[in-house]
Image (spheres, rainbow, N blue to C red):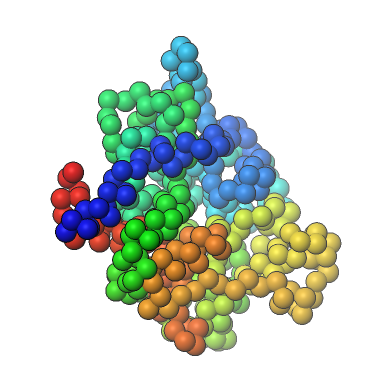
Amino acid sequence: MAQVGEKVGVLRGTTVQQIVEHKHRLVEIPYMATVNDALTTLLAKNILAVPVAAPPGQWIGAGGSMILESDKVTGVVRKQYIGMVSVLDILIHIAEAEKEEDVDSRLKAPVSSIIGHSMEGLSLWSISPQTSVFEAMEPMSKGIHRALIPVESKMDHTIGVELMEASPGYHIFTQTDMVEFLYMHSKELDFMTNLSVLELGAVHPEVYAAPSCMKVMDVVKCMRKTSLQAVAIVESTGDLDNELALVRGNGRKLVGTFSASDLLGCTSEMLRAWATLPILSFFSKAGIAQRFGMGAAVNAGPFECRGFQKSPVTCHLQTPLAEVMSKALTSHVHRVWVVDNDGNLNGVVSFSDMIRVVHDFFSKHNPQADYQ
């Protein structure tokens, strides 16, 4: 038990402030920026989501939040963060265009109008800078992907996740930061190296998937209806697949992934040009365009496109947790698909799952950890 106590000490002895203090200050966009401006910012900064800032007192923040930025000297409130917008929100917004010519007008819409298109944008959280890594694990294990960390907290609390905060500035703390920290300490947290994702209970067994013949816009619409952040792409079985609906992916051959991470680097021009293509063709065209330009992608045939299909990041049921973390971090993805020896889907391990099982391990083996 003492040994377990020493291990959890690594997590309890580090605050979220220590992790983010060397990161750049928060990237944000104003509420009247256009959707295209938001996409350009995400592209330029190579990030998946960005907070939206507005004048204080005029908005109800996402999820009822009231996260404010104040002047460092006078304390006067200058702005309020009203929500998050991700590349997936933007694609959902574009997917709702009834005609191709409607896409341009949708890209000119104010970004504040698309907050909440995906579930993630419906909440905005702040975590006290003195919160330990261990304490931050619980909310992040339940699906909070990112939270704002005040540079100087004005609240009375000392730890925890809050909907209200005022600070002269913020950093952002993400699930990626959390998993990077855990992986960096995998030698001390040696159970992550010794135990598989199956043994730790990290595998989510049910997987929704899109047949490879499904069009991008149809996938996006289905994801919005089902509140999914990502889906597997599986080989199409021809007439057995309904091209307008997601399918149960278990036992199907995995060929790709569709998520916000996979949309990194996509410009509005790419989304406008190829959003009606089958999903694998879209990613192939986008990959060629990012490397050689739009002209090369437009003229690329099936043979050229085949070489630009990204392989999905996978593991097996017996893969150690630390190795799965490494795969995800190296490939800049937020989930790893679990497959059998033939490449058929068995489940998925997300960042939320990875964080959850580490937290649960210490809660089970050292119950006092939650109260120390």
In what quadrant of the picture does the C terminus appear? top left
Residue 93 visible? The answer is no
Residue lying at 33% horizontally and 60% vertically, measured from the top left: 189
- Which quadrant of the view contains residue 276? bottom right
Instruction: Look at 61% across and 77% down and name the residue there.
Output: 213
Residue in front for this viewpoint, 122 or 93: 122
Residue closest to the eye, 343 or 273: 343
* Left or right of 37 on screen, residue 143: left
**Residue 348 visible in image:** yes
Position of residue 270 in the picture relative to residue 203 (left or right): right
Snapshot quadrant of residue 163: top left
Q: So how many labels did they put on this image?
A: 0
Residue 240 x, y percent position in the rendering: 51, 86
Q: Position of residue 288 (x, y in %)?
A: 75, 65
At a point 31% along the width and 49% down the height, the residue shown is 11
Q: Is residue 19 above or below residue 61?
A: below
x, y percent for residue 39 = 64, 46
Q: Residue 36, how many percent across, how many down?
A: 67, 44
Rendered view: 18 above or below 368:
above
Say which quadrant the N terminus sits in: bottom left
* Residue depicted at 31% across the width and 66% down the height: 191
